[in-house]
Image: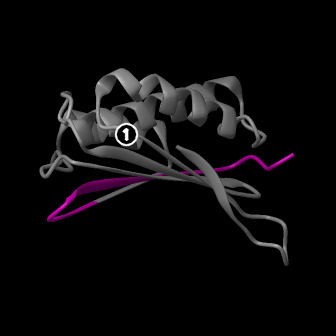
Amino acid sequence: MVTMIERDEDTNTTDTVHLRVPADPAYLAVIRTATAGLAARLDLTLDEIEDLRIAVDEACALLLDHQPHPGANLKAAFTLHPNTLDVLVTGPALDLPQRTSFAWSVLEALVGQVATGADSEGSWVRLTHIGGRRT
């Protein structure tokens, strides 16, 4: 399911696209493709777009524990600001890596800001890339 449901009509500067796919690694290509397409709306280099795509893919893999979760969903919300792309991914994994882990180091190296959290339903990862401008 893909829906674009939010737009700041007063400033015309914020769009949010929500994507929901089955919680199965087989669907990560859909989220990677959406990431690249939405990142291309910002004035980013090809390397920055690829870094974002890889970071979102890694975050999704972590939220799936690298395995399918029948009946569950993986959700991604992409918020585009004039010079920022914020991606919030939620999934069924209950445990995320520590800040000292290799996976966390990879995420921090690829995007500007990384935040995580968890509740009884699963976990979330927020990736924020700042820079460039929307065209």
Amino acid under label 1? Answer: Leu
At x 62% / y 51%, what residue is drawn?
Answer: 3
Residue 49: x, y in percent?
62, 31
- Name which quarter of the figure residue 88 lies in: bottom left
At x 43% / y 35%, what residue is drawn?
Answer: 55
In the foreground, 33 or 23 = 23
What residue sits right under mark 1 in the picture?
A: 107
Residue 131: x, y in percent?
68, 49
Mark 1 Cα shell of 10 Å, populated few (<14), some (14-19), many (≥20): many
Quarter of the image for the C terminus: give it: top right
Q: In this view, does 109 lie above or below 78?
A: above
Which colour style is shown?
A: one colour
Residue 134 drawn in magenta: yes
Quick check: 79 left or right of 59? right
Badge 1 marks a residue whose secondary structure is helix
Residue 64 drawn in magenta: no
Quick check: 32 left or right of 58? right
Q: Is residue 11 above or below residue 107?
A: below
Q: In this view, does 45 lie above or below 17?
A: above
- Name which quarter of the figure residue 44 lies in: top right
What stretch of residues is rendered in magenta? 117-135
At x 19% / y 36%, what residue is drawn?
Answer: 69
Magenta region, mostly helix, strand or loop?
A: strand
At x 44% / y 37%, what residue is drawn?
Answer: 56
Quick check: 32 left or right of 70? right
